[in-house]
Image: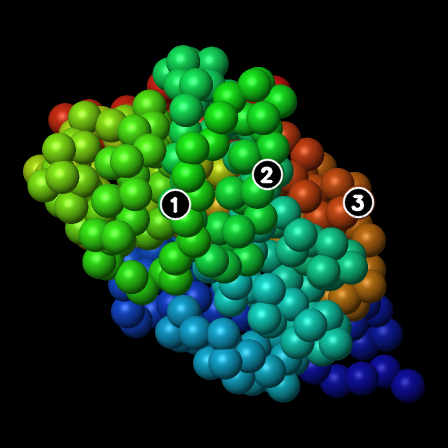
Amino acid sequence: MCIGGLLSACGPRVPATITIGVAQPLSGPSAARGQDIVNGAKLAAADLNAAGFKVAGKQVQIEIVAVDDKADKEEAKKVAQGLVDQKVTAVIGHLSSDVTESVIPVYRSGNVPQFFTSSAAELTRLGQGNTFRLIANDELQARAIASYAGETLHASKVAILHEDTAFGTPLAKAMAAALARQNKKVEYTEATDNKTTNFAPFVAKLKAARPEVLVAMVRDHQLLPLFDQMNAAGLGDVPVIATSVAKTQRAATSAGIRTLYLTSSSAEVDEFAGGKEFVRKFRAAYKSDPVWAAHYAYDAVYVLADTIRRTESVDPAVLRARLMVIDAIAPVTTTMRFNAEGEQRYGAISVYQRRDSRWDPLMRSDRW
């Protein structure tokens, strides 16, 4: 029996409207990054709808449902279950690795494919074939940090400050192992939560250790007071390497920061061939510039749409299988390709230096 409301009476079960959930922090300190991802996804949906996106010859609308996870694991579980209950076709979420880790079982049990920009290496393994990372992972980032600290900055003694989360702890461990392979010494390591801003005890230990480089895997709202306290202790000249969680305009323009490098598992939009056109459209739509990973969310919507178009299906099992092999349309990055584990085939880590109130790209590589 044919079922009404589907694109063709007896054909592929693709609804007239495909709904994609975007679960991000839309309030709190990470709201700008979360909204950036929402805006990128909405822009892709608008472009596809305006172009008359079709599956099996029938026009299909793409709808974005944005929800606020408040950067909180328990709230994220609630909104994730809500998206599962709405029977969304896929989800782009969440932002930080610890929050993403908490919701992977929700989407997996709910049979909803999940795309995310979190970088903790174990996340795709936890996803068991249901997760697709849009950026490079932290196994590569750990090697990049160690390589840049030891080989480019020629540091033989390194200190590490990291957040005690699914992002910071494994990354710090992997980076220390990579430094050890270079015969570099980690003078001191300290874990912190992602809310601490009083680093006086840590700075005192840092002063005693006298490292040549500090690797600070903390967020921008922590990095700024850390620099202030280091400056007050006479440690302002110690080069600091941060990670993508601190790659914000606020950190770029802070007067208290002296020498700051940053590794990122996501590349700036203007590093891609399609970046200029994306920025033009983004500015026209939102009267502002993208701030972080909007272009990755934009391409994720296009990749999903292209996969649905080619398979003529929204069946999760069909989509997951094809996403692992498809050479799909990705207008900005052009190289959004997933392997059998859901990792990026062509992921790379960029290194930036804070200079003249901006992030100046220094190098990018997938072979650290």
Mark 2 or mark 3: name the one nearer the start of the chain. Answer: 2
Residue 333, x across and y down, in percent:
51, 34
Query: Mark 3 against mark 1, which lies toward the viewer?
Result: 1
Label 1 crowding class (10 Å Cα cut-off): few <14, some 14-19, many 20+? many
Q: Residue type at mark 1: give it.
A: Leu
According to the image, label 1 marks what residue?
161
Residue found farthest to the front:
208
> Which quadrant of the rendered structure holds the N terminus?
bottom right
Residue at image position (28%, 35%) is 208
Q: Give the Cα distance between marks 2 and 3.
A: 23 Å
Work out whether residue 285 or residue 262 is closer to the camera in this orientation and state it.
262
Mark seen at residue 174: 2
- Say which quarter of the image contains residue 90: bottom right
Q: Residue type at mark 2: give it.
A: Ala
Question: Which structural element holds mark 2?
Answer: helix
Question: Which structural element holds mark 1?
Answer: strand
Label 2 crowding class (10 Å Cα cut-off): few <14, some 14-19, many 20+? some
Q: Are marks 3 and 1 in contact (CB under 8 Å)?
A: no
Residue 190, x across and y down, in percent:
41, 49
Residue at image position (54%, 34%) is 176
Work out whether residue 40 or residue 50 is closer to the camera in this orientation and state it.
40
According to the image, label 3 marks what residue?
340
Q: Number of marks in the image?
A: 3
Query: Mark 2 against mark 3, which lies toward the viewer?
Result: 2
Q: Residue type at mark 3: give it.
A: Ala
- Say which quarter of the image contains residue 329: top right
